[in-house]
Amino acid sequence: MTSDRDSQVLIVGAGPAGAALALLLAQRGVQVTLVERQVDFAREFRGEIVMPSGWRVLEALGLGRGLEEIPQRHPGEIEIFHNQRRLFGISLDQQPSGGMPVSLSQPRLLETLVEVAQTHSGFRFLRGASVKEVLRAGDRIDGVRVQTAEGSQVLRAGLVIGADGRASTVRRGGGFTAQVRDAPMDIVWAKLPWPSSWKEGKVQAVVGHGHLLIAFPAPDGELQVAWVILKGAFGALRARGISEWVEEMANHVGAELGSHLRTNKDTLSRPFLLDVVTDRVEGWSRPGALVIGDAAHTMSPVGGQGINVALRDAVVTANHLVPVLQAGATGEILDAAAAMVEPERGPEIDAIQSLAALPPRVVLRRGWTGELVRFALLPLLGRVLAPLTAKPLRQLFDGVTHVELKV
Ligand SMILES: Cc1cc2nc3c(=O)[nH]c(=O)nc-3n(C[C@H](O)[C@H](O)[C@H](O)COP(=O)(O)OP(=O)(O)OC[C@H]3O[C@@H](n4cnc5c(N)ncnc54)[C@H](O)[C@@H]3O)c2cc1C
């Protein structure tokens, strides 16, 4: 095992939270090491919807033309169906507000963040390096042990930041504990060719019979399908075979999309099943360590919030850490700055997790009471949501609290 030189900050995980924070710190002269277990960002399926609140962070990161060059598509119209019946459509093109959701290639975004960070001399990126252990000196966390193709290596730092996602090693190894929040669903993800009869940018959401299916433009030109089902239901569906589960899905959507699903049955044969988890760590920092992003609060993909809140965590973390790091602070001063992150970010996380928990409860409710609630609520919802000015929707788009890069 080799031992390595110290950095001021060591970030575990180059997802949106870790890569954005590493860039912000490196741009401001901080010695930062970013460690990522994957060799290639495209090897893991990652969400791709970025809300205006997340987009504003990306604009503040100084990526210049790099941001425009990332493959992206802009949803134009959302159609809502209830049990194969089209209820209403919402045009996103004609909305007066600034900024709408964007479907953005996350692998390319992460590559861009790392590429720009690499132009700063204090930044170091270890790709294909998996953190296996959190190390301590007395009560203080002071580094990690990573495994690479070359062997095991020890990395020490003034502050270790866990941005290593929903199965965070830093959370576990650092002794952080989380409260799990109710997430009664799983999501089946699959990609299909873009339907030739669909207008560019069309999004379709289908609600009914204990299902929610959302079909939206993927940045690579394909149609991304997210099928939200009751937790544990997919095992039984898969056991009945591919034809049956595609049929089950096709029977719940409009005729046109149903026929497209059946035609592309073979493409759908290898879906990705996401076990949806929602949780929140209580106490994001401790001596020598901080957790942010999904490592601190695993987000449900419902509402497309995970990337946004991860990017916003990075901004708030930079706001608190940069002044003390630039002054060369270590130990308790650094810990005190890290402890400021949770009080500022917690209220938004709590509000968004509560908002995102609501639709599955209404949509996945089975039996006649569920149908009655949907029958009564959905048309009403159309009237409330169509102008896109309803408060809960604006909170999902724009964020709940004010987040601004101040350093
Ligand atoms: C299938 C799916 C679809 C989603 N869709 C959306 C969406 O459309 N919009 C949205 O906003 N959110 C979506 N989400 C949620 C969103 O992806 C996450 O909330 C967001 O990526 C969290 O960012 P993060 O940087 O905290 O963590 P992550 O993006 O999970 O990044 C963590 C990184 O840490 C690395 N890592 C993990 N363990 C280690 C280790 N031991 N050593 C080194 N590196 C490690 C991982 O490889 C990864 O690159 C989706 C999530 C999933 C799973």
Image (cartoon, rainbow, N blue to C red):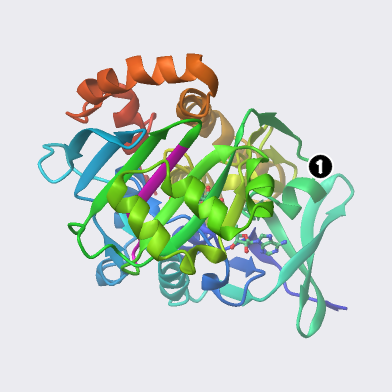
Vertically, is 337 above or below 115? Answer: above
| Disc 1 residue crowd, few under 14, some 14–19, many 20+, Cα 10 Å | few
Quadrant housing residue 384? top left
Quadrant housing residue 12? bottom right
Nearer the observer, 41 or 362: 362
Q: Is residue 153 left or right of residue 31?
A: right
**Residue drawn 28% across and 72% down?**
69
Is-magenta flag for residue 394? no
Q: Is residue 107 left or right of residue 174?
A: left
> Where residue 257 sits in the image (x, y, percent)?
32, 52
**Residue drawn 66% across and 38% down?**
284
Residue 398, visible in the rendered structure = no
> Where residue 163 sits in the image (x, y, percent)?
61, 53
Nearer the observer, 363 or 333: 363
- Amino acid at circle 1: Gly
| Secondary structure, magenta segment, majority class | strand
Vertically, is 239 above or below 389? Answer: below
Is-magenta flag for residue 217? yes
The residue that mark 1 highlights is: 175
**Residue drawn 42% across and 49% down?**
250
Vertically, is 254 above or below 41? Answer: above
Q: Quadrant of ligand 1?
A: bottom right
Pick the quarter of the image with the N terminus: bottom right
**Residue drawn 19% across and 59% down?**
200
> Where residue 196 sits in the image (x, y, percent)?
23, 65
For the record, the magenta segment spans: 212-219
- The verdict on label 1 being within 8 Å of ligand 1 is no
> Where residue 287 sits in the image (x, y, percent)?
75, 43
- Give the farthest residue toward the bottom: 150
Q: Secondary structure at mark 1?
A: loop
